[in-house]
Image (tube, coloured by chain):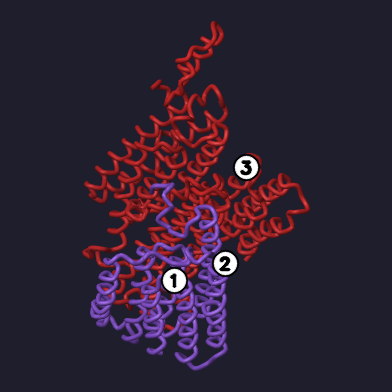
Amino acid sequence: MMEDILYGLGPLVVILLALLGHRYRWERLRQMVAVWVSVVLVGTGALAYGGIAHGHFSPILVMLTNLVAATSAWDSVRWGQEHPDMRPRRYYLWWALFWASLITIALARDLAIAWLAIEFSTLASGALIVEMGNRRALEAAWKYIVIASVGLAMGIIGILFVYGSLRTQGLGWQTLSYYNILHHFHEISPIVRETATILIVSGIGTKVGLAPFHTWLPDAHSEAPSPVSGLLSGILLGLCLVTIDRFVTAVPLPAETLFSGPHLLLIFGTLSVVVGTLALLVQRDIKRLLAYSSIEQMGIMAVGFGVGTPWARDAALLQFAFHAVIKSTLFYIGGHLSVVYHTKRLDKITDIVRQHRGLAVAWAIGILALAGLPPLGLAYSEWMILQALWQDHSTVVLIVLSAALVLAFAALLYHLLRGLWGGFEISARRDDTENREPAGLLDRVPTLGGVRH
Amino acid sequence: MAIAGFFVFMTTVGLLWSRNVIYSVMFLAAEGLALTAMVWISDPLTLATLGIGIATLIVKAGVIPGTMYRVISQWPSEYRRDQPLPFWAYIAAVALVLAVRHVILLLTPSGIILHRPLFFYGMASIFLGLLLMISRRHVVAQVAALVAVENGLVVLAASVAGALPTFMEFGMLIDLLAAVAILVWMSRRIRRQFNTTDVTTLKFLRG
């Protein structure tokens, strides 16, 4: 009860602060929101400690949500200073509604509530993207809302089929609680179960960004305000995937069914890993790089949930936790880098080590963690998923995933090294030349990734 | 009830036919009225069904078409017309409507379908709405298609479950209202910033 009040009060206070915020300077408002969200985070830790210690999913998910919400709120303070044109009241109003929808998805024990919250999260986050005010953001938000709404419409058809099959219970909306579905799934005919599974996995999978339903994701995540990109990529995608897993677990299908939940998760997951990894190799935009990496990471998690053993599901959850922290941080840093360099182009964001040492250290640690370098977290959870695939004798998926992880490591390392030291040699030479004699024409020619063209 | 479902289906066909988005908005208002009638005649009138019916009437026959009309009516006439549908869209529409029959044959043995004609109208409206979303190029026509899909879902729900729980009915209604409010707001901005209402001109980003 106390927990529910706290979780409800969190976004509500932010909404009130946003509505009454005109009494304060914008900077003060941003700081007040950040402090309040941090208080909610501490409260969450205190109240959900028991559940977290016992490894229960929901408390861990809420804790993660509020952790990333707190970092997002603190990053919004600096991001707001960097974007003085952004109206904080509207920003925080949508931000609070988005946060509320994330908490609701994390806590939902009912498929209908989860669906409504996911739909609402699309609208709130879409509005936050529009708040950027430029054409690219408007286009990204339009595609995001339209494609996600179509996907979610597919999902609700599946939910209606499940509800229709269990309507005689007369339990009202509680018919769709995962507990009730799990205990009465045998009353749903296999063909309806299979159809509902295909629709729900594909429909909510659109919101996860699983390939081939991922086309909206790189646009939306790269054009959103960076603190929001952190929440979108770090939390929302994973929560939607957990919703799929909760449904798939509650409505099992015979192992020989071609399009069962685990099979679909393995297929879409593997495809996402391949698509995300290949896209990493050719990215030119710092935030799109991170967005495509999210597709790859969601693919890895989907594979973990698809294997379905307790070890694999724990690994997928661990992957979610590590990814949430690392990816949100990287989005924040990527946002600041794009501001200080006045561009999001990776070939222009170079020589970070010399020019912004603090950001360089954080960016390097984040990218290495994302690439799966031991002993940083993702290396451990990815190894667990590979191990689960080995034990499950899923050889093809294991080979594809291993190859993709190696490629992703190489791609991320390439972008990292180019960003940290690319252009270093040229700029060092330019400094040297400037000290000795007036710069020649050749030194004024723009460089591309440290290579003169 | 089947008549109301048929009316929803026919108005969705009207959306497919109409190039003038003002007509599309009128079709949506007519769909809202049909859905309200369906809610009130499907079950014995209780406080819950009365409330859902009133909310449906206000939101789907009033606020949503009204908001869309208010925005479109301020635009010059060249921004109110959509491009003609490509020929493949008509063929796809016929194929999709025929495909519903196959879905019904597939699901009938499971006993999930309570009302076959209603299931047909609901599923066909959803399919046509989805087709509209990929074939229509006008921003407001796409919003209308999204509302048509949602209306088809309500008919489909009535055909498989009789009625949805009140909580879900209101939840979906509020979600739709918020979605339309945001999308119409975005439509205005798209017209202002891109000086067009054609979504195919949104080409800055490549997925």
Same chain shared by disc 3 and disc 2: no
- Residue A83 tag number: 3
Question: How far from the left and from the top, in percent, is residue B44?
Answer: 49, 93
- What amino acid is labelled 1 in the image? Asn
Q: Give the colour in which the image draws chain B.
A: purple
- What amino acid is labelled 2 in the image? Gln
Image quadrant in which you'd find residue B185: bottom right
Quarter of the image with the N terminus of chain B is bottom left
Image mark 2: chain: B
Which residue does the image show at 54% across and 65% down from the upper left? B75
- Residue B74 tag number: 2
Mark 3 and mark 1: span between their CA atoms? 40 Å
Tag 3 secondary structure: loop
Question: How far from the left and from the top, in percent, is residue A288?
Answer: 43, 42
Does residue A317 appear in this view? yes
Tag 1 secondary structure: loop
Which residue in the protein does label 1 denote? B20
Chain that is red in the image: A
Tag 2 secondary structure: loop
Apparent side of residue A424 relative to residue A92 in the rendered image (left or right): left
Image mark 1: chain: B
Mark 3 and mark 2: span between their CA atoms? 32 Å
Q: Nearer the viewer, mark 3 or mark 2?
A: 2
